[in-house]
Image (tube, rainbow, N blue to C red):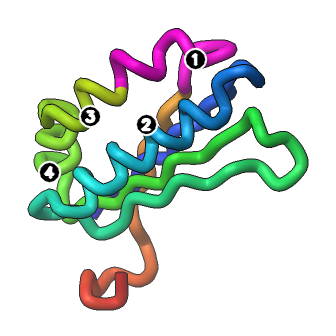
């Protein structure tokens, strides 16, 4: 199992548009085979900062996500909204290891 935490900073004028586009990507991602979680989190103190928490059963499922129409559309639409390039960091899941606990 693999988690990718994607850190995004959005230009203030695009906050609502970014949330709308992320919601579309979330809905598509959570219907993908191999998806365990796909959370969109907004910084409590700075509404321009986001964490996208993506958990998949394998690196292969994670890679397939990046080829889906909803991800490709999200990427192209939000690129201009970002104050700086997004930063994704991959993690191995240590606990819980049982996918039914996700």
Q: Nearer the viewer, mark 4 or mark 3?
A: 3
Which residue is depicted at the point 67% across and 32% down? 15
Residue to which mark 4 is pinned: 61
Which residue is depicted at the point 51% across and 39% down? 6
Residue to which mark 2 is pinned: 21
Q: Indicate yes or no whether the magenta region holds residue 81.
A: yes
Whether residue 77 sits left or right of residue 8 in the image: it is left
Mark closer to the chain start, 2 or 3: 2
Q: Nearer the viewer, mark 2 or mark 3?
A: 2
In this rendering, the answer to whether 46 lies above or below 78 is below
Dots 2, 3 in contact, CB < 8 A: no
Q: Nearer the viewer, mark 1 or mark 4?
A: 1
Dot 4 crowding, Cα within 10 Å, few <14, some 14–19, many 20+: some
Determine the secondary structure under disc 4: helix
Q: Indicate yes or no whether the magenta region holds residue 77.
A: yes
Residue to which mark 3 is pinned: 71
In this rendering, the answer to whether 84 lies above or below 44 is above
């Amino acid at each position: 199992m693999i988690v990718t935490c994607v850190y995004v900073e959005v230009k203030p004028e695009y906050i609502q548009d970014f949330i709308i586009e992320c919601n579309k990507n979330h809905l598509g991602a959570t219907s993908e085979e191999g998806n365990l979680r796909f959370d969109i989190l907004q910084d409590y103190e700075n509404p321009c900062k986001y964490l996208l928490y993506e958990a998949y059963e394998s690196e292969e499922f994670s890679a397939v996500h990046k080829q889906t129409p909803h991800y490709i559309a999200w990427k192209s639409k939000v690129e201009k909204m970002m104050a700086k390039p997004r930063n994704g960091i991959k993690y191995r899941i240590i606990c819980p290891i049982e996918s039914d606990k996700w």
